[in-house]
Amino acid sequence: MSRASPVACGIAAALLLAGDARAQTANRFALGANFNTAIAAAPDNTSASHVGFQWRLGHTEGGWGWRFGFNWYSTNIGARVVDSPVQLGELHVRPIMFGYGYTHKVRRTAVSASLLAGYAFNKFSLDDHASAVYRVTTGNQPLRSGAQNTVVIFPELSMWRDINRKVGLNVSIGYMFARPDVSVETTGGVYHHSVRADTVRIKVGAVYSIF
Protein backbone atom coordinates (compact mmCIF):
# COMPACT_ATOMS: atom_id res chain seq x y z
CA MET A 1 0.00 0.00 0.00
CA SER A 2 3.00 2.29 0.55
CA ARG A 3 3.53 2.72 -3.19
CA ALA A 4 0.05 4.08 -3.77
CA SER A 5 -0.36 6.19 -0.64
CA PRO A 6 1.96 9.11 -1.60
CA VAL A 7 0.27 9.38 -4.99
CA ALA A 8 -3.20 9.30 -3.47
CA CYS A 9 -2.24 11.90 -0.84
CA GLY A 10 -0.77 14.20 -3.45
CA ILE A 11 -3.83 14.03 -5.67
CA ALA A 12 -6.14 14.48 -2.70
CA ALA A 13 -4.24 17.63 -1.73
CA ALA A 14 -4.55 18.94 -5.26
CA LEU A 15 -8.27 18.33 -5.18
CA LEU A 16 -8.69 20.31 -1.99
CA LEU A 17 -6.43 23.20 -2.97
CA ALA A 18 -7.59 23.75 -6.55
CA GLY A 19 -8.85 27.22 -7.36
CA ASP A 20 -12.42 28.25 -8.14
CA ALA A 21 -12.31 27.57 -11.86
CA ARG A 22 -15.50 26.75 -13.69
CA ALA A 23 -16.63 23.16 -13.20
CA GLN A 24 -16.54 20.41 -15.83
CA THR A 25 -20.29 20.86 -16.34
CA ALA A 26 -20.23 20.66 -20.13
CA ASN A 27 -18.64 17.21 -20.16
CA ARG A 28 -20.45 14.39 -21.99
CA PHE A 29 -17.45 12.13 -22.52
CA ALA A 30 -14.00 12.52 -20.95
CA LEU A 31 -10.97 10.28 -21.44
CA GLY A 32 -7.73 9.99 -19.50
CA ALA A 33 -5.47 7.70 -17.52
CA ASN A 34 -5.15 6.33 -14.01
CA PHE A 35 -2.68 4.68 -11.67
CA ASN A 36 -4.36 1.51 -10.40
CA THR A 37 -3.11 -0.62 -7.50
CA ALA A 38 -4.49 -4.01 -6.44
CA ILE A 39 -3.23 -4.86 -2.94
CA ALA A 40 -3.61 -8.56 -2.17
CA ALA A 41 -5.56 -9.34 1.01
CA ALA A 42 -4.12 -12.86 1.36
CA PRO A 43 -0.51 -12.89 2.64
CA ASP A 44 0.58 -15.54 0.12
CA ASN A 45 -0.63 -13.55 -2.89
CA THR A 46 1.18 -10.67 -4.56
CA SER A 47 0.07 -7.08 -5.18
CA ALA A 48 0.31 -5.34 -8.53
CA SER A 49 0.12 -1.82 -9.97
CA HIS A 50 -0.39 -0.57 -13.49
CA VAL A 51 -1.33 2.49 -15.54
CA GLY A 52 -4.59 2.22 -17.45
CA PHE A 53 -7.30 4.15 -19.28
CA GLN A 54 -10.01 6.07 -17.42
CA TRP A 55 -13.21 7.55 -18.76
CA ARG A 56 -16.14 9.59 -17.50
CA LEU A 57 -19.60 9.53 -19.04
CA GLY A 58 -21.62 12.69 -18.47
CA HIS A 59 -21.26 14.76 -15.34
CA THR A 60 -21.69 13.39 -11.82
CA GLU A 61 -25.03 14.29 -10.26
CA GLY A 62 -26.13 13.93 -6.64
CA GLY A 63 -28.53 11.29 -5.33
CA TRP A 64 -29.11 7.60 -5.91
CA GLY A 65 -28.22 5.91 -9.17
CA TRP A 66 -27.09 2.78 -10.97
CA ARG A 67 -23.38 1.93 -11.26
CA PHE A 68 -21.25 -0.38 -13.38
CA GLY A 69 -17.61 -1.36 -13.29
CA PHE A 70 -14.90 -3.74 -14.51
CA ASN A 71 -11.76 -3.44 -12.32
CA TRP A 72 -9.77 -6.24 -14.00
CA TYR A 73 -6.60 -7.32 -12.23
CA SER A 74 -4.09 -10.14 -11.85
CA THR A 75 -2.25 -11.61 -8.87
CA ASN A 76 0.28 -14.36 -8.23
CA ILE A 77 -1.36 -16.77 -5.80
CA GLY A 78 0.24 -18.93 -3.13
CA ALA A 79 -0.88 -22.44 -2.20
CA ARG A 80 0.32 -25.71 -0.72
CA VAL A 81 1.17 -28.71 -2.88
CA VAL A 82 1.00 -31.67 -0.50
CA ASP A 83 2.89 -30.02 2.41
CA SER A 84 5.04 -27.66 0.36
CA PRO A 85 4.15 -23.94 0.20
CA VAL A 86 4.66 -22.57 -3.29
CA GLN A 87 3.82 -19.64 -5.55
CA LEU A 88 1.29 -21.53 -7.63
CA GLY A 89 0.95 -19.18 -10.60
CA GLU A 90 -0.76 -16.10 -12.02
CA LEU A 91 -4.52 -15.61 -11.73
CA HIS A 92 -6.31 -13.11 -13.98
CA VAL A 93 -9.68 -11.87 -12.66
CA ARG A 94 -11.93 -10.09 -15.18
CA PRO A 95 -15.21 -9.05 -13.53
CA ILE A 96 -18.24 -7.38 -15.10
CA MET A 97 -20.26 -5.68 -12.36
CA PHE A 98 -23.44 -3.68 -11.81
CA GLY A 99 -24.83 -2.09 -8.67
CA TYR A 100 -26.37 0.89 -6.94
CA GLY A 101 -24.98 3.83 -5.01
CA TYR A 102 -25.45 7.29 -3.57
CA THR A 103 -23.59 10.50 -4.50
CA HIS A 104 -23.27 13.60 -2.31
CA LYS A 105 -22.27 16.68 -4.27
CA VAL A 106 -20.81 19.92 -2.90
CA ARG A 107 -19.95 22.50 -5.57
CA ARG A 108 -17.22 20.92 -7.72
CA THR A 109 -16.72 17.80 -5.57
CA ALA A 110 -18.84 14.63 -5.76
CA VAL A 111 -18.35 11.78 -3.26
CA SER A 112 -20.02 8.44 -4.02
CA ALA A 113 -20.54 5.22 -2.09
CA SER A 114 -21.66 2.18 -4.07
CA LEU A 115 -22.03 -1.58 -3.91
CA LEU A 116 -21.43 -3.57 -7.09
CA ALA A 117 -21.72 -7.28 -7.78
CA GLY A 118 -21.18 -9.38 -10.85
CA TYR A 119 -19.44 -12.27 -12.50
CA ALA A 120 -15.70 -12.69 -13.06
CA PHE A 121 -14.18 -14.58 -15.97
CA ASN A 122 -10.92 -16.00 -14.67
CA LYS A 123 -7.77 -17.41 -16.22
CA PHE A 124 -4.90 -19.18 -14.45
CA SER A 125 -1.35 -20.03 -15.58
CA LEU A 126 0.70 -22.53 -13.56
CA ASP A 127 4.17 -21.33 -12.57
CA ASP A 128 7.15 -23.37 -13.85
CA HIS A 129 8.52 -23.80 -10.33
CA ALA A 130 5.11 -24.95 -9.06
CA SER A 131 4.98 -27.46 -11.92
CA ALA A 132 8.32 -28.87 -10.75
CA VAL A 133 7.05 -29.06 -7.16
CA TYR A 134 4.06 -31.08 -8.38
CA ARG A 135 6.37 -33.55 -10.14
CA VAL A 136 8.59 -33.98 -7.07
CA THR A 137 5.93 -34.12 -4.33
CA THR A 138 3.19 -36.06 -6.15
CA GLY A 139 5.18 -38.00 -8.75
CA ASN A 140 2.75 -36.78 -11.40
CA GLN A 141 3.32 -34.57 -14.43
CA PRO A 142 1.08 -31.45 -14.65
CA LEU A 143 -0.80 -31.39 -17.93
CA ARG A 144 -2.98 -28.28 -17.78
CA SER A 145 -4.40 -25.77 -15.33
CA GLY A 146 -7.37 -23.43 -15.09
CA ALA A 147 -9.62 -21.36 -12.84
CA GLN A 148 -13.37 -21.43 -12.35
CA ASN A 149 -15.37 -18.29 -13.01
CA THR A 150 -16.91 -16.83 -9.88
CA VAL A 151 -19.30 -14.26 -8.40
CA VAL A 152 -17.61 -11.07 -7.12
CA ILE A 153 -18.71 -8.27 -4.77
CA PHE A 154 -17.17 -4.80 -4.76
CA PRO A 155 -18.05 -2.01 -2.25
CA GLU A 156 -16.38 1.27 -3.26
CA LEU A 157 -15.88 4.90 -2.23
CA SER A 158 -15.08 7.38 -5.00
CA MET A 159 -14.49 11.13 -5.28
CA TRP A 160 -14.57 13.29 -8.42
CA ARG A 161 -13.21 16.84 -8.40
CA ASP A 162 -13.77 19.23 -11.31
CA ILE A 163 -10.62 21.29 -11.80
CA ASN A 164 -12.01 23.33 -14.71
CA ARG A 165 -14.40 22.91 -17.65
CA LYS A 166 -12.16 20.29 -19.27
CA VAL A 167 -10.29 18.47 -16.51
CA GLY A 168 -11.63 16.16 -13.79
CA LEU A 169 -9.69 14.21 -11.15
CA ASN A 170 -10.77 11.00 -9.46
CA VAL A 171 -9.66 9.08 -6.35
CA SER A 172 -11.34 5.80 -5.40
CA ILE A 173 -10.84 2.90 -3.02
CA GLY A 174 -12.72 -0.39 -2.87
CA TYR A 175 -12.49 -3.99 -1.74
CA MET A 176 -12.94 -6.82 -4.22
CA PHE A 177 -14.32 -10.12 -2.86
CA ALA A 178 -13.25 -12.90 -5.26
CA ARG A 179 -12.96 -16.58 -4.26
CA PRO A 180 -12.41 -18.76 -7.35
CA ASP A 181 -11.27 -22.40 -7.39
CA VAL A 182 -8.05 -23.20 -9.24
CA SER A 183 -7.39 -26.66 -10.63
CA VAL A 184 -4.24 -28.43 -11.84
CA GLU A 185 -4.73 -31.54 -13.94
CA THR A 186 -1.88 -34.07 -13.74
CA THR A 187 -1.18 -37.59 -15.01
CA GLY A 188 -2.37 -38.87 -11.62
CA GLY A 189 -5.56 -36.82 -11.21
CA VAL A 190 -6.88 -33.30 -10.67
CA TYR A 191 -5.80 -31.13 -7.72
CA HIS A 192 -8.08 -28.31 -6.56
CA HIS A 193 -7.10 -25.16 -4.65
CA SER A 194 -9.59 -22.73 -3.09
CA VAL A 195 -8.15 -19.25 -3.62
CA ARG A 196 -8.81 -16.05 -1.70
CA ALA A 197 -8.13 -13.54 -4.47
CA ASP A 198 -9.52 -10.54 -2.53
CA THR A 199 -7.81 -7.21 -3.18
CA VAL A 200 -7.93 -3.64 -1.94
CA ARG A 201 -8.29 -1.50 -5.06
CA ILE A 202 -6.85 2.06 -5.07
CA LYS A 203 -7.17 4.21 -8.18
CA VAL A 204 -6.01 7.77 -8.88
CA GLY A 205 -6.82 9.23 -12.28
CA ALA A 206 -7.46 12.29 -14.42
CA VAL A 207 -9.68 12.80 -17.47
CA TYR A 208 -9.98 15.45 -20.17
CA SER A 209 -13.33 16.29 -21.75
CA ILE A 210 -13.46 15.26 -25.41
CA PHE A 211 -16.96 16.65 -26.03
Image: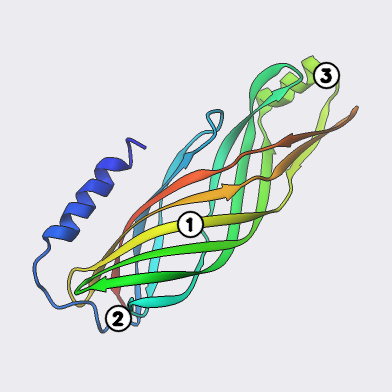
Q: Are marks 2 and 3 in contact (CB under 8 Å)?
A: no
Left or right of residue 184: residue 66: left
Residue 113 position within the rendered picture, expressed as x and y whole percent measured from the top left:
40, 63
**Which secondary structure lies at badge 3?**
helix
- Pick whichever of labels 2 and 1 is earlier in the sequence: 2
Q: Is residue 46 above or below residue 25?
A: above
Which residue is at a point 60% across and 34% down the rendered structure image? 77
- Pick whichever of labels 3 and 1 is earlier in the sequence: 3
Rate crowding at label 3 as few (under 14), some (14 to 19) or many (20 or more) other CA atoms within 10 Å: some
Q: CA distance from mark 2 to mark 1?
A: 26 Å
Q: Of all residues shown, which one is farthest toward the right?
A: 188
Which residue is at a point 20% across and 72% down the rendered structure image? 108
Left or right of residue 121: residue 103: left
Q: Which quadrant is home to the C terminus?
A: bottom left
Q: Is residue 167 above or below residue 128?
A: below
Residue 91, picture quadrant: top right
User: What is the image's colouring?
Assistant: rainbow
* Disc 3 residue type (three-letter): Thr
**Which secondary structure lies at badge 2?**
loop
Residue 154 position within the rendered picture, expressed as x and y whole percent measured from the top left:
52, 56
Which residue has dot 2 on it? 27
Instruction: Tell which tag, 2 or 1, sits nearer the viewer.
Output: 1
Which residue has dot 1 on it? 155
- Pick whichever of labels 2 and 3 is earlier in the sequence: 2
Give the label on residue 138, or none.
3
Q: Nearer the viewer, residue 118 or 184?
A: 118
Residue 155 position within the rendered picture, expressed as x and y whole percent measured from the top left:
48, 57
* Disc 2 residue type (three-letter): Asn
Residue 32 position within the rendered picture, expressed as x and y whole percent measured from the top left:
33, 65
Q: Which quadrant is home to the N terminus?
A: top left
